[in-house]
Amino acid sequence: MRYVHSEEPLMRFEVLTLFPDLIRDAFGWGMTGRAAADGLLALDTVNIRDYPTNSYGSIDDEPYGGGAGMLMMCEPVYRAYEEALRRLQRTGGVRVICMDPRGEVFTEAKARELSGESELIFLCGHYEGIDERVLQEIVTDPLSIGDYVLTGGELPALVVMDAVARLIPGVLHNEASAEDESFDHGLLEYPQYTRPAEWHGKKVPEILMSGDHKKVLQYREREARRRTKERRPELYEEYLRKRGIW
């Protein structure tokens, strides 16, 4: 199953996975689903299980040197990669992102970098991982979404796809939304409020209802700095360093 529009999309995602339904179902909701329906994004999945190396349907085997669990084998992964290239009508040159806890930590800056591509291939591992040789052969961007281990690469891949997709022009409908979020300027997002003006004894700060746009911007900047300093001091130090403030 594919999410593809008749017009040329701004971004194509190809996902190499053992669980294509998980990717397709999650992608079909909310922002990414609407963007696919509008023709801005396209998604295709390649089931690695369709490329076994023997009549038993094997796509994994025991690791050399011993150890717990099984490893995904080179050839099924590589054949799935070749199928993704075929669908993209490419012979190479497409960035391949492998979701790997040993990879570069994914950031908003990386999302912006990747959003400049027109095609991305995601490789989702399972079991104890993937044979290192095929990773060396095809992967350009090993990425991690944090210092913890999950049961597979599908959820991290969806996280990266979502973060990249929202930066594609037209996906959010309100382009200003992408400029005001956490991390965009090196700070966490300021707190926000809506009606009613008082709830459970908690009031909306008066300055936000003042109508003074300049003061509102100043307040939000102060709150973004305060929140970042309290919750993510390492980000706040980096924010100050980049601005030469010590």
Image (tube, rainbow, N blue to C red):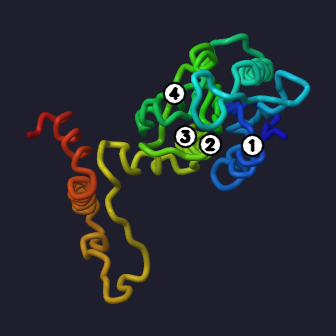
Which class describes the residues within 10 Å of circle 2: few (<14), some (14-19), or many (20+)? some
Q: Amino acid at mark 1?
A: Phe
Q: Which residue is mark 2?
A: 152
From where the camera sits, is residue 34 visible?
Answer: no
- Decide which of tag 3 and tag 4 comes sooner along the chain: 4
Mark 3 or 4: in front is 4
Q: Position of residue 231 (x, y in %)?
A: 27, 57
- Decide which of tag 3 and tag 1 comes sooner along the chain: 1
Q: Which residue is mark 4?
A: 142
Question: Which of the 4 image quarters holds residue 137?
Answer: top right
From the viewer's perspective, tell me whether residue 206 is left or right of residue 127: left
Q: Position of residue 46 (x, y in %)?
A: 78, 32
Name which residue lies at 32% across and 59% down: 190
Q: Which residue is mark 3?
A: 160
- Decide which of tag 4 and tag 2 comes sooner along the chain: 4
Q: Quadrant of the C terminus?
A: top left
Mark 2 → mark 3, Cα distance in angstroms: 14 Å
Which class describes the residues within 10 Å of circle 1: few (<14), some (14-19), or many (20+)? some
From the viewer's perspective, tell me whether residue 115 is left or right of residue 126: left
Mark 2 → mark 1, Cα distance in angstroms: 10 Å
Mark 1 → mark 4, Cα distance in angstroms: 20 Å
Residue extending farthest to the left is: 246
